[in-house]
């Protein structure tokens, strides 16, 4: 590595260490100070014990004058024992403080990751690389960040201890010093090499680890359990999970073996040097250069020195990993601090929303999901999107509501280009795959607009409009009922009931642009007919974009857009499209015939919508 490269690495190392310590400092500075002082006290304690130990040896063996001094030995022994007790007490207090600090740091670091994730553009979630980065950052936040300040403190304490031991040794036999340093070098070198290689290995295994996490969720989750049993899939996923762990295990074994011999060789070299130091000490004692008490104390110091050296190398080995994880955490959370941005207040109205020539492709998508689509929406209108699976209906609504930004084309609200945040503030969405929050019924509805979470009147009105009030009335606890059987006292709903709750959530958000993506897919025919019969009354003064595969429900729309492979291929009212006798008319007749049990003549080229 070049000098420049080394300098850069050193600078980064320094920055990361600072970052780690700052994490602790921000989480609880008082506790950091306490822990730091305790570590310092421990280091000084070891030095003190060594010096008092020398007093014991002096007293027993009689240095200089050759006479035994039992009282000196006894007093020194009491000092050694007292210091040992104080040190172990300080150690326990330090560990207690560290445990609390760890949780505080984890909380801050995880908050930083979740905040950064919450601010990330939705499209990023479609990229596998993003999920790898989230995983690395989360591991860093949950494991490495809480540990780093202690790694730094342990290295500080060990270094301080080593320094006090070395000072004591210099006072007794200075020439041991170079031998000790040379003994430590090979192990430190191997430790540094190993930590870098281990992080690279972890990075290679990230996707595998993510798969293992996903499979574990499949095998243990409540929602997944029924399908796994119905299809008899448990064994298949169990085997896949085992294969994931095998891959990790094999990689870990290969890695550890690769470094095992290097480490043994380094330790051997260190031992040879330590043995040389001990030999030198013995020779010096026999030659009368060093007296016996000094030699004994130096030997004790040597042992402590070796022990601290081993501790430093093992800390270094693991801390390198931590530093690299921390680098991921720092990059991921860069420039983000504090909680996720508050939502932009919902806008109450708009005059016209014009979409011009919108196009969009998913990262890694085989083709353009939305191609050159134009439409305009006004309050009071119902516009329906129909088309075969994968024709781009949902994606188009995500562009209209500012969840994705179009690759080309523009969105104008009342003549002005509308940024994504403004479009989101204008709209309320009932997704096809809406979330079922394992929270109370009231929260499930009121989360439609968190600014009005406690607004009971709005809650009741939204539930009534969505036809959810009757469902809630039957629940023990009513609006306070906890949903999700995994939680204590939790209850569950049928799919159709969940859909009404999700619809109530869409109502709760009183936004002027309403997107309903298959809003009645799970509802019974009466509920469905009721919703569509009253859709104009329910969403009066709002623009409704309705996606449905059921033609009976879209026929009353003001305009129907037929999509195919991302493009609008037909537009008009139901009557106009039937008169045009194109794809819409063909699909409508096909569906109607199925209800009436009549055969339908279908040209070979026609495909149902
Ligand atoms: N996350 C994604 N990543 C890559 N491609 C995607 C993603 N989501 C959808 N697509 C692709 O984009 C195209 C449009 O999908 P979209 O979900 O908008 O269709 P749709 O008309 O709503 O379908 P459906 O009627 O089945 O709900 C499809 O070809 C689909 O495969």
Image (cartoon, rainbow, N blue to C red):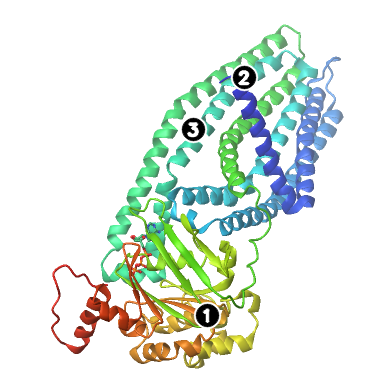
Label 1, label 2: how far apart the Cα atoms are: 67 Å
Which picture quadrant has residue 176? Answer: top right
Tell me which label, 1 or 2, sits earlier in the chain. Answer: 2
Which residue is the site of mark 2? Answer: 3
- Image coordinates of residue 379 in percent, x first then y, are 52, 80
- Image coordinates of residue 444 in percent, x first then y, are 53, 78
Residue 27 visible: yes
Between circles 3 and 2, the one closer to the viewer is: 2
Label 3, label 2: how far apart the Cα atoms are: 21 Å
Tell me which label, 3 or 2, sits earlier in the chain. Answer: 2
Tell me what residue is drawn at x 62 percent, y 33 percent.
311
Which residue is the site of mark 3? Answer: 197
Pick the front one: 266 or 350: 350
Between circles 3 and 1, the one closer to the viewer is: 1
Q: Quadrant of the C terminus?
A: bottom left
Tell me what residue is drawn at x 57 percent, y 64 percent.
418
Q: Quadrant of the N terminus?
A: top right
Viewed as shown, does residue 440 lie left or right of 208? right
Q: Are marks 3 and 1 in contact (CB under 8 Å)?
A: no
- Image coordinates of residue 246 in percent, x first then y, are 35, 45
Q: Secondary structure at mark 2?
A: helix
């Amino acid at each position: 590595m070049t000098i420049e490269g080394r300098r850069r690495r050193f600078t980064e190392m320094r920055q990361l260490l600072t970052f780690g310590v700052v994490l602790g400092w921000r989480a609880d500075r008082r506790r950091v100070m306490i822990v730091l002082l305790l570590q310092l006290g421990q280091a000084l304690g070891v030095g003190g014990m060594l010096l008092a130990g020398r007093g014991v040896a002096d007293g027993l063996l009689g240095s200089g004058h050759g006479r035994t001094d039992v009282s000196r030995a006894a007093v020194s022994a009491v000092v050694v024992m007292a210091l040992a007790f104080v040190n172990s007490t300080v150690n326990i207090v330090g560990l207690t403080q560290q445990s609390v600090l760890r949780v505080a740091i984890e909380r801050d670091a995880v908050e930083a990751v979740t905040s950064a994730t919450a601010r990330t553009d939705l499209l990023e979630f479609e990229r596998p690389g993003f999920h790898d980065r989230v995983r690395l950052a989360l591991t860093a936040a949950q494991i490495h960040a809480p540990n780093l300040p202690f790694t730094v403190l342990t290295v500080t304490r060990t270094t301080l201890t080593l320094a006090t031991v070395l000072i004591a040794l210099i006072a007794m036999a200075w020439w041991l010093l170079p031998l000790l340093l040379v003994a430590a070098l090979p192990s430190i070198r191997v430790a540094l090499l190993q930590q870098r290689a281990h992080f690279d290995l972890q990075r290679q295994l990230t996707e595998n680890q993510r798969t293992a996490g996903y499979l574990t969720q499949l095998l243990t989750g409540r929602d997944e359990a029924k399908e796994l049993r119905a299809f008899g899939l448990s064994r298949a996923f169990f085997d896949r999970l085992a294969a994931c762990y095998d891959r990790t295990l094999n990689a870990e074994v290969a890695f550890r073996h690769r470094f095992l011999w290097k480490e043994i060789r380094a330790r051997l070299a260190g031992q040879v040097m330590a043995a040389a130091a001990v030999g030198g000490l013995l020779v010096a004692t026999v030659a009368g250069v060093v007296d016996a008490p000094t030699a004994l104390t130096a030997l004790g110091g040597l042992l402590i020195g070796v022990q601290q050296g081993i501790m430093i190398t093992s800390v270094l080995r693991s801390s390198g990993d931590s530093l690299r994880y921390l680098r991921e955490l720092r990059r991921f959370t860069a420039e983000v601090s504090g909680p996720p941005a508050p939502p932009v207040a919902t806008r109450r109205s708009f005059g016209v929303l014009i979409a011009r020539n919108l196009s969009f492709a998913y990262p890694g998508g085989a083709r353009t999901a939305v191609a050159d689509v134009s439409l305009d929406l006004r309050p009071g209108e119902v516009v329906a999107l129909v088309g075969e699976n994968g024709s781009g209906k949902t994606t188009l609504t995500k562009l209209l509501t500012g969840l994705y930004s179009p690759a080309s084309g523009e969105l104008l609200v009342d003549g002005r280009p509308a940024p994504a945040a403004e479009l989101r503030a204008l709209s309320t969405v009932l997704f096809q795959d809406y979330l079922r929050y394992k929270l109370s019924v009231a929260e499930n509805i009121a989360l439609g607009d968190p600014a009005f979470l406690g607004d009971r009147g709005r809650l009741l009105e939204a539930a009534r409009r969505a036809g959810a009030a009757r469902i809630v009335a039957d629940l023990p606890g009513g609006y306070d009922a906890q949903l999700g059987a995994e939680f204590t006292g939790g209850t569950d709903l049928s799919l159709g009931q969940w859909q009404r709750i999700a619809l109530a959530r869409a109502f709760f958000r009183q936004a002027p642009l309403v997107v309903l993506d298959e809003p009645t897919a799970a509802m019974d025919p009466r509920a469905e007919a009721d919703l569509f019969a009253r859709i104009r009354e329910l969403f009066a003064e709002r623009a409704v974009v309705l996606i449905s595969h059921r033609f009976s429900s879209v026929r009353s729309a003001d305009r129907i857009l037929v999509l195919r492979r991302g493009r609008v291929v037909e537009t008009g009212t139901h009557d106009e499209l039937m008169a045009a006798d194109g794809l819409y008319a063909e699909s409508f007749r096909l569906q109607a015939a199925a209800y009436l049990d009549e055969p339908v003549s279908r040209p070979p080229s026609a495909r149902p919508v």
